[in-house]
Image: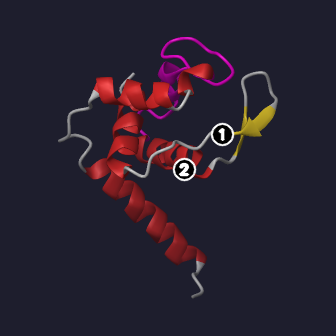
Amino acid sequence: MKFSLNRISLLVAASAAILTSSAAFAAVDADAAKALAKKNDCFKCHAVDKTKKGPSYKKIAAKYKGKEAEGFEKMHKNMTTGPKVKLEDGSEEDHKIIDTKDEAAIKNLMQWILAQ
């Protein structure tokens, strides 16, 4: 099936809307988010409030303040597809893929990061 650029853009926007639509209504489970991040070694490259190999979660949250849909889209892509990302020192490496198929757990982690 061929998709036009407009159709793909619409699908991306709809996905972002779905991911963020219940964000205001769902409480973030910080303990579950931190446990998922720890299980997947996210803290090897990220910290809540200091820069490591990757940006701090506070820096990510500040970058997407007021642009949460864009933040969800970018984080979801990084966490689920493992694209090449630029590190704080300018080098590049493949982002680690989160080891879970539970979209609710991934969404909770993204909400927790954006709440920092």
Q: Secondary structure at mark 2?
A: helix
Residue at horizontal 52 percent and vertical 68 percent from the top: 9
Residue at horizontal 80 percent and vertical 27 percent from the top: 90
Q: Is residue 59 left or right of residue 86?
A: left
Would residue 5 be counted in the magenta stretch? no
Mark 1 to mark 2: distance in Å? Answer: 9 Å
Q: Which mark is residue 16?
A: none
Magenta part of the chain: 45-67
For label 2, the residue is: 80
> Eyeballing the image, is 53 above or below 82?
above
What amino acid is at disc 2? Thr
Q: Secondary structure at mark 1?
A: loop
Residue at horizontal 62 percent and vertical 39 percent from the top: 96
Q: Residues within 10 Å of mark 1 (few under 14, many from 20)?
A: many
Q: Please identify the quarter of the rendering in which residue 25 is found.
A: top left
Q: Position of residue 79 (x, y in %)?
A: 54, 44
Q: Which mark is residue 95?
A: 1
Position of the C terminus, as image quadrant, is: top left
Q: Please identify the quarter of the rendering in which residue 87 is found.
A: top right
**Mark 1 or mark 2, which has the lower sequence index?**
2
Q: Is residue 33 left or right of residue 88?
A: left
**Which residue is at the far top?**
50
